[in-house]
Image (cartoon, rainbow, N blue to C red):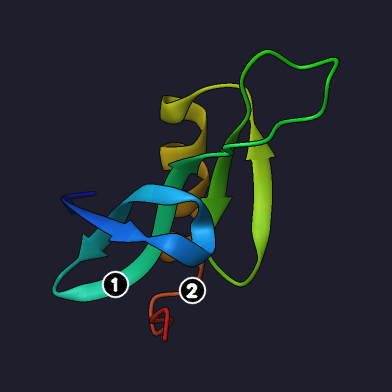
Amino acid sequence: MDYDIVKRFRAEFGGQVEEVYVNGRRVGMVYRDPKPPAEIDELWMAYTQGGQGARSRDEALRAVLRHAEENPDYELQ
């Protein structure tokens, strides 16, 4: 699946996010949680219709793209 990533600052998500676009539709965001739980060194989030934790940026990106593929009409508002 072809996609584009646009980096943006979003204070409500703790700073820098990567917005994921498929065919011009913003289908989700990937970002590093600025305050992960104490037992986790780093937590990435895949944001589509809510947040989903991931162990890495790549895993979060795959989750966003999987959601986009399973929901071809979905666009993050």
Q: Going 54% across and 48% down the picture, which residue do you hit? A: 46
Left or right: where does residue 18 sit relative to residue 7? right
Residue 11 in the image: state x and y as whole percent.
43, 62
Q: Amino acid at mark 1?
A: Arg
Residue 54 in the image: state x and y as whole percent.
63, 32
Residue pointed to by mark 1: 26
Left or right: where does residue 60 sit relative to residue 50? left
Asked if residue 21 is positioned above or below residue 41 in the image, the reply reads below
Whole-number angstrom distance, CA of label 1 to CA of label 2? 12 Å
Residue pointed to by mark 2: 71
Q: Going 22% across and 64% down the picture, which residue do you hit? A: 22
The answer to which of 46 and 22 lies nearer the viewer is 46
The answer to which of 33 and 67 lies nearer the viewer is 33
Q: Amino acid at mark 2?
A: Asn
Q: Going 50% across and 51% down the picture, which residue do you hit? A: 14
Name the mark on residue 55: none
The answer to which of 55 and 74 lies nearer the viewer is 55
Tell me if mark 2 has few (under 14), some (14-19) or many (20+) residues whose alpha carbon lies within 10 angstroms of its own: few
Residue 66 in the image: state x and y as whole percent.
48, 51
Q: Earlier in the sequence, mark 1 or mark 2?
A: 1
